[in-house]
Amino acid sequence: MELILAKYNYWIYVFLMMIGFYAMIVKNNLVKKIIGMSIFQTAIILFYVSIGAKKGATIPIIEHHAHSGAIDPAHYINPLPHVLMLTAIVVSVSTLGVALALILKIYHQYGTVEEDEILEQIQ
Amino acid sequence: MKAIGLITVFSLGMALFYATIDFPPWADPQSPASLHVSPHYIQETMKETDVSNVVTSVLADYRGFDTMFETSVIFTAGIAVILILRKYSKKEDEKFLPEVSEEAEPDIIIQTVTRIIVPFIQLFALYVIAHGHHSPGGGFQGGVILGASFILLAISFNLKAMLRRISERKDILLGGIGLLIYSGIGALCVLLGANFLNYKVLHLIIPEASQVEARSYGILGVEIGVAIAVMAIMIAIYANLSSDGKYDKGL
């Protein structure tokens, strides 16, 4: 029970990552592969954010009246994972745009987004 | 093929499940990730940068290089989408074209609500950018909200209506300007005699600002640059994807 309560969030992220990875390598449709990649990225983002959590701590915004005394880091959650994921979210959106543009171009060329049909046409 | 994939995914998942045994318990204040540099950020940010939102100060000051190159990744992605999809000539040389559905009747409720709500969305975006020093927010979030307001306009009217407000040429120019503001502030610091992106020397040109306040102003300038670049690139990606690079009526 103790183990489940301490670790269950990591297990959820591993499970999400498995779903995304399965879609990336098994699905035939290129758009579904992209959706799988997005699920994978979401799992990583959730994992990072949960690393920064601290029990009983608040968001990492220093209260204005507090800066005269010493600030206890245990009162504020770790800001570093938030910074890393903030940029990662926006970058993942723009890379998603590039991926969709490439798929659109592939459709123009082959008339399909199914991987096996594209491979048949190439051979 | 499916079986191989399933076995691969399952074995990887099991390895990761096994690895979680060594992880620190959830929300443990003593976890290794929270003991290295983050106590310094939390304790010193008010003294060193005068910015109470630690995420903003780490984003734009302590990890300024990281954010600058993330912004250039976004800019490069936008340029890549334009290069892949944009068609300048009228002639069709593609073999297969997506099926275009009949254009729907313009909906008066959606259009009226959009017309009323878009200025407020943009005002809120400016608030999120400017108030990122003291509340959750900043350049990336505000830029995405600004871009979303234009995309909402393009969805509820059509792409032409959006392009009347912000033309293609202006949009790409804004993307470049955003990145230029960021790297330009960094280069200004070099010209004033400090390291790249070391904002504290900006007190020489900002009147009545101490070195600490100059870092706060430097962060604000950088966030504005990020917001402009993100907004422009979001609009460019949407416009190219929705109209197949033709910049006609769009979806």
Image: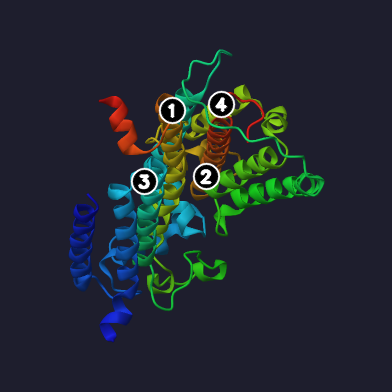
Asked if badge 2 and badge 1 are on a common chain, one would say no
Asked if badge 4 and badge 2 are on a common chain, one would say yes
| Residue closest to the eye, B121 or B47 | B121
How crowded pointer 4 is (Cα within 10 Å; few <14, some 14-19, many 20+) is rated as many
Q: Chain ID for label 4?
A: B
Q: Secondary structure at mark 1?
A: helix
Residue at 50%, 29% in the rendered image: B180
Kind of residue sitting beneath label 4: Ile
Measured along the vertical axis of the image, is residue B28 above or below residue B168? below
Asked if badge 3 and badge 1 are on a common chain, one would say yes
Q: Nearer the viewer, mark 4 or mark 2?
A: 4
Query: Any mark on residue A33, and which?
Result: 3
* Alpha carbons under labels 3 and 2: distance apart: 46 Å
The answer to whether the residue labelled 4 contacts the one labelled 2, judged by CB atoms less than 8 Å apart, is no
Which residue corresponds to mark 1? A105
Q: Chain ID for label 1?
A: A
Q: Nearer the viewer, mark 3 or mark 2?
A: 3
Which residue corresponds to mark 4? B172
Q: Secondary structure at mark 3?
A: helix
How crowded pointer 3 is (Cα within 10 Å; few <14, some 14-19, many 20+) is rated as some
Q: Secondary structure at mark 2?
A: helix
Query: Any mark on residue B214, and which?
Result: 2
* Alpha carbons under labels 3 and 1: distance apart: 16 Å
Q: Chain ID for label 3?
A: A
Kind of residue sitting beneath label 3: Lys
Asked whether residue B117 is in view, the answer is yes
Q: Residue B83, position in %: x, y?
A: 46, 23
